[in-house]
Amino acid sequence: MKELIKKYGLAPHPEGGYFREIYRSGICLESPATKTMRNAATHIYFLLTAGQVSRFHQVVHDELWHFYQGAPLRLIQYDGNRIKEEVIGPDEGYLSVVPGNVWQAAESTGAYSLVGCTVAPGFDFEDFSFLSDAPRDMARFTATQPKFKRFL
């Protein structure tokens, strides 16, 4: 994994794993969700290695996950009521979409998973939050989804 981190210039991500932004649109528009200006789209490389998780978080806008290489990626979505699990990879399909404001988490099913994430309108950390920072949602989640505790 050190080779991939070096090759792509990845850095630790606050939610877990490693990332590097590789695209930020030069076109700006007003986000209908936040009523603030955002780049039209952004894209990152994102790497999770064995034992790492992407902690439950949400982004205000839709996020497209693209599989590139390694083991398939397990993507978990929580809409406040139900869990949806999906695997993306060579045999499962290469893309998954997480709608805006849906809690999401992920993990590699093997040694590592290299994926890309596109957000439109573009990603801004002001539009990002962890489930652990939302007391009401966190209480409901921990009461109904104990098997996913390690993703917090």
Image: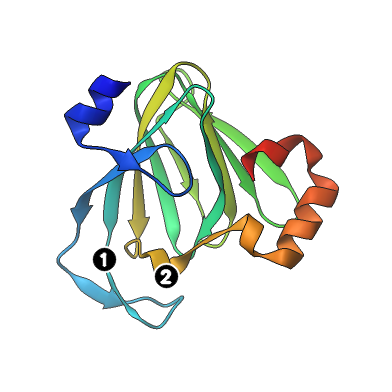
Q: Quadrant of the N terminus?
A: top left
User: Within 10 angstroms of label 2, few (less than 14), some, or many (20 or more) residues?
Assistant: few
In the image, residue 21 lies at what x, y percent?
25, 49
Question: In the rendered image of this protein, does residue 32 appear above or below residue 151?
Answer: below
Residue at position x 49%, y 23% from top? 92
Tell me the residue that label 2 is attached to.
Answer: 126
- Which callout, 2 or 1, points at the residue further toward the start of the chain? 1
Asked whether disc 2 touches disc 1, contact meaning CB atoms under 8 Å apart, the reply is no
Q: Is residue 54 in view from this perspective?
A: yes
Give the distance between the C-alpha atoms of the residues marked 2 and 1, in whole angstroms.
16 Å
Residue for badge 1 = 40
Let me know if residue 45 appears in the view: no
Which of the two discs, 2 and 1, sits closer to the camera?
2
Q: Where is residue 53 drawn, in percent x and y? A: 53, 35
- Relative vertical location of residue 113 with respect to residue 38 in this rendering, above or below: above
Question: Image quadrant of residue 61?
Answer: bottom left
Q: Residues within 10 Å of mark 1 (few under 14, many from 20)?
A: some
The relative height of residue 102 versus residue 76 in the rendered view (above or below) is: below
